[in-house]
Image: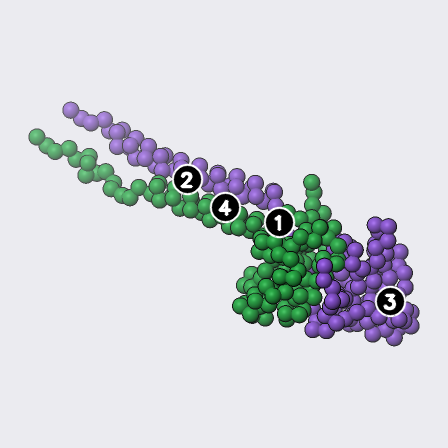
Chain colours: A purple, B green
Amino acid sequence: MKRPSTYLRRDVAGASDQAMTPMIDVIFLLLVFFVCTASLQIIEQILPSQMSSALGNETADPDIPPPEQMDFDQVVIRIGWVDNLPSYRINNEPVGSLDLVRERLLALARVKVDVPLVLHPDPPVPLGFVISAYDEAKLAGFPKVSFAVNPTSRK
Amino acid sequence: MQAPRYSLARKVGINMTPMIDVVFLLIIFFLVSSHLVRQETQIELPLPIAKSASEDKILDVPRVTLNVKSDGQMFLAGREINIERLEPHLRELREQKGDQLEVRVRGSRETPYNYVEPIMVACTKVGIWNVSFAVYSKERSQ
């Protein structure tokens, strides 16, 4: 009696189908995993802040002349917190909003971009506003932006 | 009687299916566990937004992540720490990891500056100059 000729071919084809199924399952599982994690997590970035050795003792000098005199050796941005709103002062001169701070910094950067810029936020100022001011300083092109800190500050 | 020949014609080989299964299972395990480890040190915080932020490309630098909540609670490597213990801890870490140590501050955008300022003071006191802030480059869409 002759064996059916299709037996072997069917067996091989069946085996290859069987081998592929779990792999496809797992690949889809991985795909779902990546899609879920990618959509849930926003990509975090960094804002580097190289601190100078003098930073620990640095404080803002309130008697710095206004920038119109063009003889400034540093730019100090004071950020206050009044009525739950930030208030800005650049070299002791009040500046209404962050947009005006940006304009002012761009104007200063056109005159003297390599001047050190010191951010001096008041203690209650939320970090978001501090980082926004820092961001504006970086975007204006100031290469040396540092934070004024009180060495004795302890909470 | 002639012996059947089909048994010889059959291919004899290793079944790859279980190996592929196990390999993929391992991949999933490592992916999930690394994700969980990362979640442990990264508390969900509304980070500040900065347009000048850059992607974190330097991966081989020793780094510690400090999470600061809006009420001033600090978490170093997933464990709560207060400012009094932070400075000696950072000093110890700096001695272990060297002067390349980076401190990454993940502070909520509502955290008052007086909670962040002592961290920077502590870093400068122990000689850590590489301090960075974790930010988002755009507002998170809810």
Q: CA distance from mark 2 to mark 4?
A: 19 Å
Q: Residue at x 70, y 71 (%)?
A: A52
Q: Which residue is mark 3?
A: A91
Hey, what amino acid is under mark 3? Asn
- For mark 1, give the secondary structure: loop
Image quarter in which the N terminus of chain B is found: top left
User: Tag 2: Cα neighbours inside 10 Å, few (<14), some, or many (≥20)?
Assistant: some
Q: B18 and B41: which one is in front?
A: B41
Per the image, the residue denoted by label 2 is A23
Residue B32 marker: 4
- Indicate the amino acid at tag 4: Val
Residue type at mark 2 is Met
Kindly report which numbered mark, 2 or 4, lies closer to the viewer in this rendering.
Answer: 4
> Along the polypeptide, which appears first: circle 3 or circle 2?
2
Instruction: Check if mark 3 and mark 1 are on a common chain.
Output: no
Residue at position x 40%, y 35% in the image:
A21
Does label 4 or label 1 sit earlier along the sequence?
A: 4
* The C terminus of chain B, quarter of image: top right
Residue A60's label in the rendered image is: none
From mark 1 to mark 2, how far is it between C-alphas? 35 Å
Question: Could you say where residue A9 lies in the image, as x and y percent from the top left?
Answer: 29, 32
Secondary structure found at label 2: helix
